[in-house]
Image (cartoon, rainbow, N blue to C red):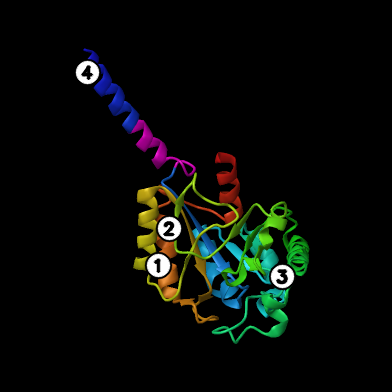
Amino acid sequence: MKKYFLLFTSAFLVINVFAQRDTLWHHKKTAVVLTYDDALSQHLDNALPVLDSLGLKATFYLSASYPGCKDRIADWKKAAIHGHELGNHTLFHPCIGGKGREWVSPGQDMNNYTVQRMVNEIRMTNVFLEALDGRTKRTFAFPCADTKIHNTAYIDGLRNDFVAARNVRAEMHTIDKVDLYNVDCYMVNGETAEQMIGWVEKAKQTNSLLVILFHGVGGGNSLNVSLPEHRKFLEYLQQDQKNIWVAPMLEVAEYIKKYQ
């Protein structure tokens, strides 16, 4: 009898573990965060209408000085009203210049920055974003995935300013392994809907967080996704919301923070 009791108990524990894994992300198998970088007009004209038609919410990381941001303030305000997150992607989008990055101008070269200058510009961008959406909680995305000024991780001085910070590495992690100030993501560069769906299926199987980064959507950037593939992928997410929690980065990051 004791043998059967132990077998029953073991089986119950295994079933319970898998049940918990499958309901971890708001009672779903995975969380998917859709992020769009650089405040492109194509985000407003091409991505937002599809997102809104499907009832999906995303995070748009804005660089305040970019034309697609400062010239379309009313449109970004409207996006925030509709439930999308406006994230901080710095004031001028500085990157580390040098070999292979000749497009980085001296004025926006992080080699010429101090940590304090970077912090000041990022905080000024938060002020700008609060003027758009009235919100004080925010997430950040590292421009060009550059996280350091002269070997100093500048995010360390900004942890009280942000709930999370997104990097760019094609990795996914379970909720207990997510580093909120170095969140990984898969960057889209010509992938088909089927390829992106494959990422989500892997996330579902491993109960991991999947963050996806779009730049161009039907144009606007050489790192691009075509309009048909973008729509097909979003329709897949919308149709499988039984298993997939789609939410902005801020909402998911707060959920992770509470769990951890």
Q: Amino acid at mark 2?
A: Leu
Q: CA distance from mark 2 to mark 1?
A: 9 Å
Front residue of this view, candidates 194 and 82: 194
Of circles 4 and 3, which is in front? 4
Q: CA distance from mark 4 to mark 2?
A: 43 Å
Q: Amino acid at mark 3?
A: Ala
Q: Amino acid at mark 1?
A: Lys
Indicate the quadrant where residue 147 lies: bottom right
Q: Secondary structure at mark 3?
A: helix
**The magenta stretch spans which residues?**
15-27
Q: Is residue 127 left or right of residue 85?
A: right
Q: Is residue 115 left or right of residue 193?
A: right
Q: CA distance from mark 4 to mark 1?
A: 50 Å
Can you say whether 116 is above or below 134 in the image?
A: below
Counting residues from the start of the chain, the first of labels 2 and 3 encountered is: 3
Write down the residue under mark 1: 232
